[in-house]
Image (cartoon, rainbow, N blue to C red):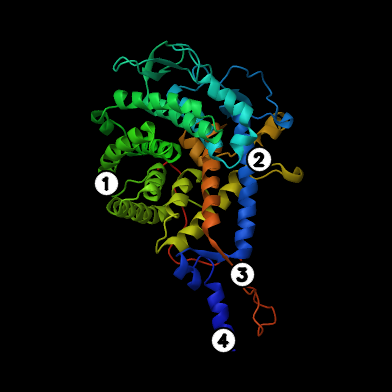
Amino acid sequence: KPFHVLASIAASSLFFGIHPAAARASKAVAVEARFKDRISSKLDVALRDATASLAWFLDVSSSASRASPTESEGVFAPFYELDIATATWRSKCELDIDTTRDSIPHCVIHKLQALTALCQSPGAASKFSPGIKRLLRRFMVKRDKVLVGLGMKRAMLPIGNGLEVWMSEMTPKSGRFDVVVPAHAAATLALVQCSTALKEPQYLEIAEAWFASIEKAWPQSSWSQSSFHLNSILLESFVRMATVIRKGSSFHDELTKFIGRFEVHLHNDFWQSASTWSFSGAHATVLAWQGEKKKTKRKTLAKLIAEYERRWLAIAPTLNATESYTCGPMQGVASLLLKPSSNAASMVQHLLTTVEKDVDRYQVTFDDHTASIAATRLSESIRLKFGDALQGSFLRDDQQLAAEKRYSLRIDDVSQCVVALTRTLELLDTLVGVEVDTQSEDDEGSNDVPETYAASALDSTEPTKAEL
């Protein structure tokens, strides 16, 4: 009997704990195999549906059941934002946005980040290859011709010799264009990510030239003018490019040198403010740590990862995870967990329960004639008109929408969850599944081991509503 009691306690400690054998072998977090199978299957379906919906938003889907309800030929990613009150779409960044709460550059960045997210989702580039290739060809529009739907044009950089840059119109119908580095960087990353996923290397030479323009248009003296989170988004873009560009190429060498300088600046900012946190910064740091070979630099990055994690554990209990849409910050949390730590067990539980909540509460589904919680927040006319297209999309919580002064379903609401789900599933692949005896011989089946177990590190699992 004492043996059975101890065995039951040991079995219960396995979920989100460190299995002894696994700990010795790889320090991997172990989870009950039954739970791992269930959550993996559920999140895989959620990602499949979200990816298909995002492809429709970008107008790269060829599925007849997701046919575009309006003529969209020539418009880059025509389904940008669905106004829930009027059941109408905002399509063109240069014409349709609500300038009281949005801007052309922000719209551009949201669309381009959505394209990048789609190309990162497993199998999506192959599945939607014709449509994605069509978007990449639109990047090759003639110089000084505005790309319809983005309100951007390629132009010669005023400084530099023969360098061109993407310039964004600053306000609708103004005709005033300027260099917006985050938008240019988003275009460069989308081209790199998608051309690599599609095995279309001819675009990489163009992307290298676009990157050279960033170095000229955005000198080091300008870095401090941007917020930590915005700089983190840029660093994440550069590091992600470096992970897919061939090592030893001139493009990779230039990227690596630039990243080294920019990292020093951003890391200094990080340590100067104890409250600073960014999911893009967390992901960029983990990617850099994974690719770093030098022991000293790797140790420095590991220290940064530990601090990102410590700060998140301090932030999380003060926020409303049980009610909020949290796909944004979960992108960073999932990345942090790729490096083993003493807090990994509780943070894995925190991540999986939070991501599952996002799926349950905020994913729009109409399975078996039953609408999800998010779907019931849409009007009957929207469900009838766009139901097939919105299947798998995500709708933020009302509090966040009110804070952003909108009541809409926007392309970035979907793309952020595609990224969060992709990274969470990648993490799940690294977890050790352990078969757990659900009954002891003495209890005659009265006390099944629960599918999930409480972790001790987080008393409250409530992450951010903002894009920290």
Q: Which residue is mark 1?
A: 273
Q: Which residue is mark 2?
A: 375
- Residue 428 is situated, as x and y percent measured from the top left of the image, at 54, 55
Residue 3, numbered label: 4
Image position of 179 with respect to 427: above or below: above
Report how far apart the C-alphas of labels 2 and 3 lie in the structure: 36 Å
Q: 10 Å neighbourhood of mark 3: few (<14), some, or many (≥20)? A: few
Residue furthest to the front: 248
Mark 4 or 2, nearer chain start: 4
Q: Residue 467's x, y, as percent? A: 43, 41
Q: Quadrant of the C terminus?
A: top left
Question: Closer to the camera: disc 4 or disc 2?
Answer: 4
Mark 2 crowd level (few <14, some 14–19, many ≥20, 10 Å Cα): many
Residue designated by label 3: 435
Give the numbered dot on residue 402.
none
Q: CA distance from mark 4 to mark 3?
A: 18 Å
Percent coordinates x, y for residue 447 in the rendering = 64, 76
Q: Amino acid at mark 3?
A: Glu
Q: Is residue 63 left or right of residue 143?
A: right
- Is residue 161 found left or right of 139 in the rendered image? left
Mark 2 belongs to which amino acid? Ala
The answer to which of 438 and 248 lies nearer the viewer is 248
Q: What SS does tag 2 mark?
A: helix
